[in-house]
Every structure is written in structure tokens, then in C-alpha cells.
Amino acid sequence: MRILITNDDGISAPGLQVAEAIAAELAGPGGEVWTIAPVFEQSGVSHAISYVRPMRIEKVGERRWTVEGSPADCVLAGIFEVLKDARPDLILSGVNRGHNVAEDTVYSGTVGGAMEGAIQGVRSIALSQYYGRATASSDGFDAARAFGASVCRQLLEHGSWPMEPFATFYNVNFPAVPAEDVKGVRATFQGLRSASFGVQPQVAPNGRTYLWLTHMRGNADTLPGSDSRECHDGYVTVTPLRADLTAHDLVEDLGRAISTDFPARPDRASGRRA
């Protein structure tokens, strides 16, 4: 198996080493693990791509590259340049330091990397590690190390991977507890918290005002069965996602309310009806 790894924390992030260990276990002795990660941290860039500027790419080791761009850029660089003659069989994006649940999913560069992989027709999994006081004595990746490979293997063997019309990919979050305290694995839906991001103003020494983004917390208040609630309660959560943003349940009613056929207009050049 050929596995491509990216992340949004950057090439030097400790979670990337965890992802590489997970990938090595999945790929096996005859497999290949390739890493293509951003030069700098790209948290919060979602599915952004460098559409209006070029991105520098540099080889920094054996099967290891950096890109001056987003996680989605890294995936594109991998599929269409570095691995253009041998596409990856799997893309792992992460392991992010911090969970990507509920509305975080929309902002996450980690999820954006996996989304791009799915759009390109490659099975893709986003991996994120919730951290907190329970794991403060370690680097925080205990649960990801212990269960990352087994969860990914279960998805590869038993997950559903339809590629049309929009490919499915998976968002995996590990709870902020030591590995021995993880309660299990749960299939979940994307949650919604009562509050997400806000801003905090700060006046700089030059008198100018700057705004810092603040992240609210409310995972315990979300619905049972959601990624945010179950991960908060100590479970590894697995959420199937697609890039399709259509509210399918509303299309039929909206069509009945607004669908209209306009009369044909004359062709201005010929005077004929169009």
C-alpha cells in the first residue's frame, strides 16, 4: 500500500510523526509512506488552495517534501507531481493537535486535506487528537498512537467508500484521555455547539487595535451521538463526510415554491424566437 501523509500543523509538528507511525503499520514492510506537509502551520485554512499564487515545493528527506501552501495544496502536489506516476492508495491528514469536531470541521485544514484527497478519488482519512488536562503529563497523542492504526484498518476493511457523486471520507477524533482510559469507538454525526469562535480585542503598543480569535468550548452540551459529545466522553469518534454542501432535504420543497420556466425571448440579431 502506498500512503500519502499531510497535515495542517506543519512539517515539524509532533502529530505528523504519529501519523507516519500509523501509516508505516498500515503499509506494512512492502508498502510506501510519503509525507508532503506545509512548511508552516496552516490551522484554520479549511479547504483553501493557492489558486492565485505559485507554491514552492522542496524535498527535505527520503519520501519527504514540504510545500509553501495549505494541506489541500500538499495533496494536489502529491497526486499530480510527486506521485504522478503512482497515485497513493490512501491519504492520511493529521494527526492534528486538537480535535476537529462539530463546526471545527468546517474550518479545519486537517479535514480540508482529506477532503481534497476524496475529491481526487483517493480514500482519505482525517486524524485529530483532542487534548486537555488529562493528557498534560504527556505529549497528548497517547490515544492516537494506541488506536490510530486499528481504526484506520477497520475503515479500510469495513468502511463504505463510494466515489460518486461526491466521495466519502472519514473524520477521526481521539479523546483527551490516556490510552488505557479510552472507552471505545463510535460512529458519529457532526455536532453543533452553542458557541464556536469569537474575538478578543487587544491594543498594541503603537495604539492600534488587533483582534485575536477565541475558541469557545461546549462539547459536553452537544447531542449524544455527535462527534463533539462522544469524543468529550472518552470515545474515538468516526464521522463519514462528503464535500457536498447541498441541503438535499430542502431541494424538493424549494423547487415547488420557486421553480419557474421563463418564456422564450426573441433573438435580437435575427428577430426569431430564441
Image (tube, rainbow, N blue to C red):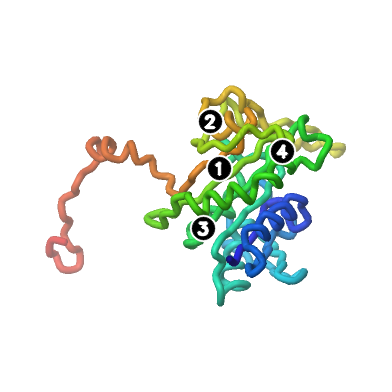
Inspect the image, locate mark 4, and give the three-letter code of the amino acid beneath it: Ala
Q: Earlier in the sequence, mark 3 or mark 1?
A: 1
Q: Earlier in the sequence, mark 3 or mark 2?
A: 3
Decide: few, some or many residues near mark 3? Use Cα within 10 Å; few <14, some 14-19, many ≥20.
many
Inspect the image, locate mark 2, and give the three-letter code of the amino acid beneath it: Leu
Q: Is residue 36 visible in this depiction of the protein?
A: yes
The residue lying at 74 percent from left, 35 percent from top is 178
Q: Which label sits on residue 152?
A: none
Q: Is residue 46 visible in this depiction of the protein?
A: no
Label 3 – label 1 distance at C-alpha: 19 Å
Query: Are dots 3 and 2 in contact, CB under 8 Å?
Result: no
Inspect the image, locate mark 3, and give the three-letter code of the amino acid beneath it: Arg
Label 2 – label 4 distance at C-alpha: 26 Å
Q: Is residue 203 above or below residue 17?
A: above
Q: Which label sits on residue 179?
A: 4
- Which callout, 3 or 2, points to the residue nearer the camera? 3
Instruction: Identify the secondary structure beneath mark 2.
Output: loop
Query: Are dots 3 and 4 in contact, CB under 8 Å?
Result: no
